[in-house]
Structure formats: C-alpha cells, structure tokens
Amino acid sequence: MTQTLPTPPFESVGCAQCRNLEGLGFDFTMAFQPIFNIRTRTPYAYEALVRGINGESAASILSLVNDSNRYRFDQACRVKAIELAAALGLLDIAGCKLSINFLPNAVYRPETCIRATLEAAQLFGFPLNRLMFEVTEGERVEDPDHLKSIFEAYERHGFTTAIDDFGSGYSGLNFLAMFQPHVLKIDMALTRGIDRDPVRRAIVEGIVLVANRLDIEVIAEGIETPQEYQALLDLGVELMQGYLLARPATGKLAVGDFSQVGKSLVCDPPDA
C-alpha cells in the first residue's frame, strides 16, 4: 500500500527563503569533490558534500537534521550547492555536472519540492541538464513507489538521476529492478582492495555488466590506490571518484592529481 505522506511544513519555501538559514537553526557550507572521466582526465561532475562552516564533518551536520527540519535542510542543500558551484565557476567546465545528494524521505510531492531547485537554477544560470541528483541506497525508503515517482519527476525536468552507494544498502538489485537511474555509484565497500579480492572483483564485474545492458553509467567511489584504479579500469569503469585523484575542497573546485597513476596505467581505447 502506498504511504500517505504529510504535507510539507514549508511547502511554499522558495529559493530566497532556502538561502536564509535562520529557520533551520544551524549553518553549513559545501565541499566539492570531482568525479573524473578517466579517458579524458576531465571532471564529469563535482559532488556537493555538506560541511560545517568551521570545517565540521558531514556527520556532525547531519546529526542536527530531524523530522522537524529535514524538508527545509534538503531544500537548503540544493540551493546552496547550486549557488556555490556557480560562484566557483563549475559552469565554465564544459559539460561538467553538479551532483547533489537528496533525502528521499524529505521529498513529499516531487513537483512541489522541486520548486526551489528550479528557481535556484534559473537565478544562477544553471542548465537543468547539468544537475545530477543522488539518492543513497543506504537510506531506508519506506515507500519505493514514492521514490520512483521522484526519479520520474526529476527525469521529466531533464535532471540526471543516480543511485549512490550501490551495493551497500537495503534493497540491492531489487532497488534497481524497480527503476533505472542514469547513473550507478558503486559503494567504496566494494571497490576497496578490489585488486586483491576476486570476490569483490566478480561482484563489480557483474554490476558493470548489468549497468551496460541497461544503458546506465557506472561511477566507482572511494578510489585510494593506483591498483584499485587499474583494476576498475580493466573492468570497464571509466568514471571514478576518490582521494587518489582529488579530495573534497571548500572554496574551490579541486583539480585532478593523476601523478600516481601515470600514463602507462590508462588503457588505450581500441582502434576504430
């Protein structure tokens, strides 16, 4: 049975109100970590990651989110990410997307809740097809049909949709069977040490195969060693994110450091 969701307490909240965080009760900022296209060594996207204004971790900020402020926080994150990314020049990077995490349990009616996002995109000149929304598979979703309706609404607006932390959460392949996003982000629990672990390698190989069959792009998260990088590249993963290439940064868009992987590690594309 479909869950009946309550009316959001800030249904009329728009872009300007989301930029004013007084009603939220705490302030925050965003760090940005790039996701690289390994073939071109250019940013595919920058993921906006919540941070405290004094450098506090995402966990410390998220611990302040509860049922009374979840909706406003989710809306404020979207607006702040778009505002800061535009100010830092993300739009000057050809084709680069801004990736924003959203809380599915904070989205009551997709078309209503998306209003502040659309206003912010218009205000800061952000093309809608350069926004990507990630939902973590690690957050329990009580009503999968509701999440499917969110993804469908986002796709109607031209947003890229992504499942984050794939392989770590509650639903696994059942999650993917219900709806197919544009992007799957493979959780770092599966990529960590993949070069030394045939089980992880087999699982990731299977995920890549399924994604290819469904025309879904794959991003590998948490890449920390050249060996992990190469093992994933050998499996056909060409979008990667992790400390090996760049750490999250506040106040700037980090550039990639490919010095540890070297040109020899990058497989040449097949001859045409």
Image (spheres, rainbow, N blue to C red):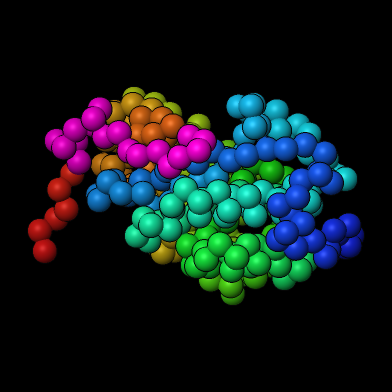
In the rendered image, residue 57, in percent from the top left (x then y), is placed at 63, 28
Residue 143's place in the image compared with 225, above or below, is below
Asked if the magenta segment contains residue 265, the reply would be yes
| Residues shaded magenta | 248-266
Asked if the magenta segment contains residue 164, the reply would be no
Find residue 15 and report its image quarter.
Answer: bottom right
In the rendered image, residue 263, in percent from the top left (x then y), is placed at 16, 37
Instruction: Residue at 25% x, 27% y: name it.
Output: 260
Could you tell me if residue 146 is visible in this image?
no
Instruction: Residue at 83% x, 65% y: name it.
Output: 12
- Mostly what secondary structure, the magenta segment? loop
Instruction: Residue at 25% x, 49% y: name it.
Output: 39
Q: Quadrant of the N terminus?
A: bottom right
Which is nearer the eye, 259 or 22? 22
Which is nearer the eye, 172 or 249? 249
Instruction: Residue at 23% x, 30% y: name it.
Output: 259
In the rendered image, residue 119, in percent from the top left (x then y), is placed at 65, 67
In the rendered image, residue 52, in percent from the top left (x then y), is placed at 65, 32
Residue reaching furthest to the left: 271
Residue 251's place in the image compared with 146, above or below, is above
Q: Quadrant of the C terminus?
A: bottom left
Which is nearer the eye, 54 or 201? 54
